[in-house]
Image: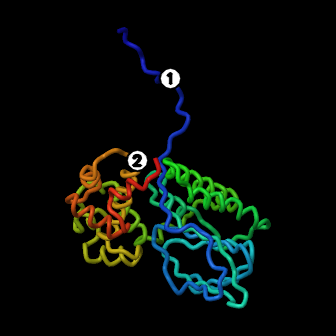
Amino acid sequence: MAWLPYHHDWKLAFQTELGLRVHWFGRYAGYPEWSVPRARLAADMVSFFFVEKSSCWSIVNGKKWNLQTGDLLIVCGGDEFIYGHDPAKPHVSLSASIAFQKGSAANALLHRHFKRCYHWKNPKEFTVEFEKVLTALTSKSSFRDLTIGGAILQWLGYILSQTRPPLSRSLADRSVVDKVLAAESWAAARLSRTITLPEWARSVGLNPTYFGRIFKRETGMSPMEWVIQRRLQMATQQLSNTQKSIAEIAEACGFESQFYFSRLFRRHFDQSPLQFRKAIPG
């Protein structure tokens, strides 16, 4: 067979590394007893809170915001917040908490300087775009991950095109938060390997005790709880998208044994890995 050259002269059309993590995405409230007690957003997340109907209020880092229909409040990692409303006039909100990894940035959204609050002149337009994601979340397709991921990225594109947040210059003030984000990126790239707390702490130049303390403060989880959660999420992807055996998935996701993996999986998802796989639509 004659030697053939590769088509190295073809221009690259598109290439990127994108990662998406969503802690919630949905429509909330509409009932009198609704409130969100004082809390702190995990270091690597950005939260979007849109008032769809009526009004409510929020206190973010000590400052009160009175929110009306069409207002979008943005809370970033490390911010403290409280939400409430008039029980006699319950509001409805659309809310999402997202980390959008792009290249080496654990959450590219944190590298943008968002204003605290924006107002939509046409709230229905926001609702339409948001509901596209809600529809995708109900997908039963074998390609559900792509359907949901694509819908959320499209929604993020819509938000960014409307708000146009410039690149931030204030990240240098977030040294502790940045260390936690760097630590998450370091561990996320090594989930299939053994991760020890001392080694993990050294990766960001901290001693294990202090590292464990600030990590839990910023994420709400101990370092090892975070690793287990990420490994289990990786396992669901492999159960959904590969034909690997349970033992192979356990090993690929960094679990010391199939038995330990299955026990943690059942505790977290209320079903065994095999039951999870069988429930996936063909």
> As displayed, is residue 4 above or below residue 152?
above
In the picture, which quadrant includes the N terminus?
top left
Query: What colour scheme governs how the chains and residues are painted in the rendered image of this protein?
Result: rainbow
The residue depicted at 26 percent of the width and 61 percent of the height is 261
Left or right: where 10 falls relative to 231: right
- Position in image of residue 162 (x %, y %): 70, 60
Residue matched to label 2: 241
On residue 9, which mark appears? 1
State the image quarter where residue 123 is shown. bottom right
State the image quarter where residue 90 is shown. bottom right
Question: Closest to the observer: 113 or 212?
Answer: 212
- Position in image of residue 181 (x %, y %): 41, 65
- Position in image of residue 137 (x %, y %): 56, 59
The three-letter amino acid code for the residue at tag 1 is: Asp
The residue depicted at 20 percent of the width and 59 percent of the height is 257
Which of the two marks, 1 or 2, is nearer to us in this view?
A: 2
Q: Label 2's element? A: helix
